[in-house]
Image (spheres, rainbow, N blue to C red):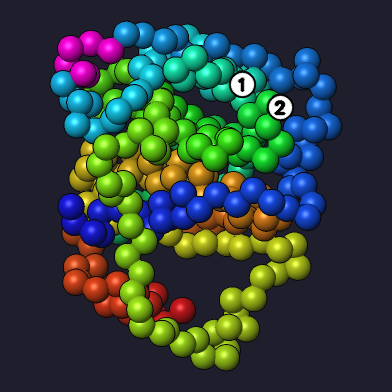
Amino acid sequence: MNRKSLPVTLCFVLSWIFTLAQSPDFKQKIASRSAESFERYDLFASEETNARQRSQLANTLSQVQILSLKKDALASLRSQAEPAISVELSYAGTLLELALVRANPVAPAFKVVTASGLRIRPDKNLYYWGTVKGQENSLAAINIYDGQISGLIAVDGHIYNLVREENAESYFLFREEDLLITNPFDCFTDEDLHWLKQEDQNQRASNADNCINMYVEVDYDIVQGKGGAQAAADYVMAAFNQVAILYANEGINFQISEMKVWDVPDPYNFSSTSDYLYAFRDALGGN
């Protein structure tokens, strides 16, 4: 796999942090709401693994829950855009009841542009953060975009992944320890020291409301793999939402302010992480 085909934001997904001196804002919102204020959505039904799936997953996952999406329920949720919802997922007899509130991982002036100069109008995607009911130190991030759902849930030392089956309608719910293969995500860090000039450090200091704005580029490999610039932008936004909750869990507001999508071949084609870093810096004029 080409190393640059993976969005950098995914490097952080497995670094869940649970202990806090003060409850983060989204957990405070959940705690302050009554149980009745969470609109219940029955989004999935369990289904049996078919022969094709058993063959496909035999060497990949030791255990998996197959789910089918209730499209009418999803359409209703997208239409209503509820501020707080309750969703149940079942995995091998374990019930995961999620209490979720709306999240906004993008800055107010967020924009998406392509390398060819087109402006992409962000779709009406929904992002939710929350917890597993009864598990104070749990985390859950759910993304709703392009008629599909994805997400991560961390509870009791387990990390659950919710993903749609490639080129199919079914969904897989599995734990990291169910993987029979090495997780392909890699941060691609190197052992070199990279020094910042003093003025660079000053410019990168957090602002008064402890908010970090991030500029993101989506490379051409992802655009090709996802079938277009809009789909690639949605995919990376979903991944970013799962990263942003980690910062929110530490009381840090982390948002994307601008995204550039390479709908033409990008200039980043190197063998080392340092080369990628320097090329990216130079492309931004050293900023």
Instruction: Place residue 88 in its image quadrant.
Output: top right
Q: Which residues are magenta?
A: 49-54
Residue 88 in sight: yes
* x and y percentages locating residue 4 in the rendered image: 25, 59
Q: Residue at x 21, y 18 (%)?
A: 54
Observer-side mark, 1 or 2, equals 2
Instruction: Place residue 84 in its image quadrant.
Output: top right
User: Cβ–Cβ below 8 Å for labels 1 and 2?
Assistant: yes
Q: Determine which of the numbered discs, if any, sits on residue 260 in the image.
A: none
Q: Is residue 251 above or below residue 149?
A: below
Q: Is residue 219 above or below residue 138?
A: below
Q: Determine which of the numbered discs, if any, sits on residue 134 in the image.
A: 2
* x and y percentages locating residue 274 in the rendered image: 31, 77
* x and y percentages locating residue 207 in the rendered image: 70, 69
Q: Residue at x 79, y 52 (%)?
A: 22
Locate residue 251 relative to residue 243 in the image: left or right.
right
Locate residue 147 relative to residue 205 in the image: left or right.
left
Dot 1 amino acid type: Glu
Q: Is residue 40 above or below residue 63?
A: above
Residue 75 in sight: no
Q: Residue at x 44, y 17 (%)?
A: 92
Q: Determine which of the numbered discs, if any, sits on residue 97 in the image.
A: 1
